[in-house]
Image (spheres, rainbow, N blue to C red):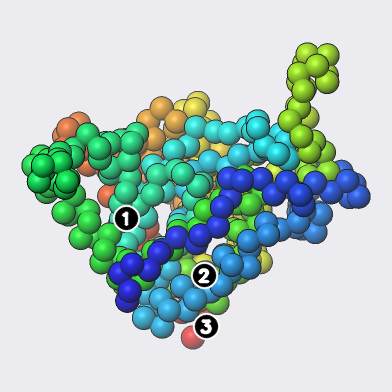
């Protein structure tokens, strides 16, 4: 494969689609019920670049399926909710995409090909090790050859070589596709598109939904075109949001019915975590919910399945050795996915 071929779907998601996003001819989007979930896709325009992503995703899946590789969709980072069409203000959440970017690397190590549906400018597999927020690469560079060349400090050589080798191998093998989103609207349209493309490979597809998806949004019929002026509303800004339809059920039942689906549940109150994760599993009828608490998400998670709750925790020693919890999570999911594929194969025998 061409080593310089970009692995990123080159679409810009952070710039608003100012001319087309606003449509005052449509009525307010109704409050979501299970029956009218599909209205969302009827009443909202798809992002204009969706067909480009569709091509990138279809050829990625096709290529990797021919190579007999399993494909995982990893979602990562937080979605935004714009308050204006020419977006100056938006609602956001805390997620930096650490869980998603780290997990993607471990899936790649286990031979999976990865579609990485991520918040634009959040952490990415491999480059996350040297991002300005985690470990700024510029702090490890020095000049040589009278200031004409740049060299990496000795202390970083080993890490950089190891990460670069993995990254280049994955690129050469065409096993990683980066697909960006910014808004919750872009996320939902792109998730649906990728799910439908992935349904072609049946149980070889795995969904690992680590993105922190907004629960509330402003329908396009109510988004003002221009920046909200502070004097417009008597100096107050009252935001009236609608609930985002819960599309997980549609994913399970209709978009990718044979794939294995893993979702996450984030809470801040430990006393309700298991209950909320169990309810999600029952409500959406998928295979696994991974529960985590905001405060401890990097050191412990709980696997909630119909029969069992299993805590996975890093020990003091693991933490000292900078072990990542995803190095424990992913092998377990790989095993569960194998069992899932076998159970689907047995069904059709
Ligand atoms: O990025 P980090 O800082 O590493 O943080 C990682 C994380 C805490 C964000 C991650 O581990 C996590 O828990 N993600 C899910 C957050 C959450 O609680 O999502 P939710 O309850 O809104 O949604 C439940 C599940 O459905 C999630 O898997 C979500 O990705 C998915 N979902 C939700 C709504 C929707 N419309 N579409 C979805 O796919």
Q: Which residue is mark 2?
A: 56
How far from the left and from the top, in percent, is residue 31?
81, 42
Residue 169 occupies which quadrant of the picture?
bottom left
- Camera-side residue: 14 or 162? 14
Query: Which residue is farthest bottom?
Result: 349
Residue at image location 70% in from the left, 39% down from the top: 86
The local crowd at label 2, few if under 14, some if 14 to 19, many if 20 or more residues have their Cα within 10 Å, is: some
Q: Which residue is mark 3?
A: 348
How far from the left and from the top, in percent, is residue 21?
76, 49
Labels 3 & 1 near each other (Cβ < 8 A) = no
Q: Nearer the viewer, mark 3 or mark 1?
A: 1
Lateral position of residue 214 relative to residue 212, left or right: right
Q: Is mark 1 within 8 Å of ligand 1?
A: no
Lateral position of residue 338 relative to residue 210, left or right: left
Q: Nearer the viewer, mark 2 or mark 1?
A: 2
Lateral position of residue 185 relative to residue 30, left or right: left
Q: Which residue is mark 1?
A: 105
Residue at image location 91% in from the left, 50% down from the top: 25
Distance (Cα) linking label 3 and label 1: 33 Å
Residue 297 occupies which quadrant of the picture?
top left
Q: Is residue 169 above or below residue 313?
A: below
The answer to whether residue 316 is visible is yes
């Amino acid at each position: 494969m061409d080593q310089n071929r970009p692995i990123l779907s080159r679409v810009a998601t952070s710039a608003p689609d100012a001319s087309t996003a606003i449509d005052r001819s449509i009525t307010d989007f109704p409050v979501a019920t299970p029956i009218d979930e599909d209205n969302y896709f009827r009443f909202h325009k798809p992002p204009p670049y969706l067909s480009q992503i569709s091509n990138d995703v279809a050829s990625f899946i096709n290529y990797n399926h021919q190579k007999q590789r399993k494909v995982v969709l990893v979602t990562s980072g937080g979605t935004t909710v714009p308050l204006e069409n020419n977006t100056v203000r938006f609602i956001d959440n805390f997620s930096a995409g650490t869980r998603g970017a780290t997990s993607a690397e471990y899936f790649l190590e286990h031979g999976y090909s990865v579609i990485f549906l991520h918040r634009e400018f959040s952490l990415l597999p491999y480059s996350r090790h040297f991002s300005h927020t985690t470990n700024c690469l510029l702090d490890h560079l020095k000049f040589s050859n009278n200031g004409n060349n740049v060299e990496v400090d000795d202390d970083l050589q080993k890490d950089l070589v190891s990460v670069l080798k993995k990254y280049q191998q994955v690129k050469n093998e065409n096993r990683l596709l980066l697909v960006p989103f910014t808004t919750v609207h872009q996320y939902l349209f792109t998730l649906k598109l990728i799910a439908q493309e992935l349904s072609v490979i049946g149980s070889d597809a795995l969904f690992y939904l680590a993105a922190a998806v907004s629960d509330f949004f402003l329908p396009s019929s109510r988004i003002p075109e221009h920046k909200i002026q502070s004097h417009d509303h008597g100096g107050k800004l009252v935001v009236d949001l609608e609930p985002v339809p819960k599309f997980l059920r549609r994913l399970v039942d209709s978009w990718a019915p044979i794939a294995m689906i893993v979702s996450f549940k984030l809470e801040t109150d430990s006393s309700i975590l298991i209950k909320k994760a169990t309810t999600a599993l029952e409500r959406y009828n998928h295979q696994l919910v991974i529960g985590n608490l905001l405060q401890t998400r990097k050191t412990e998670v709980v696997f909630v399945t119909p029969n069992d709750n299993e805590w996975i925790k890093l020990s003091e020693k693991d933490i000292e050795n900078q072990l990542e919890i995803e190095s424990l999570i992913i092998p377990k999911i790989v095993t569960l996915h194998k069992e899932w594929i076998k159970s689907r194969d047995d069904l059709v025998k």
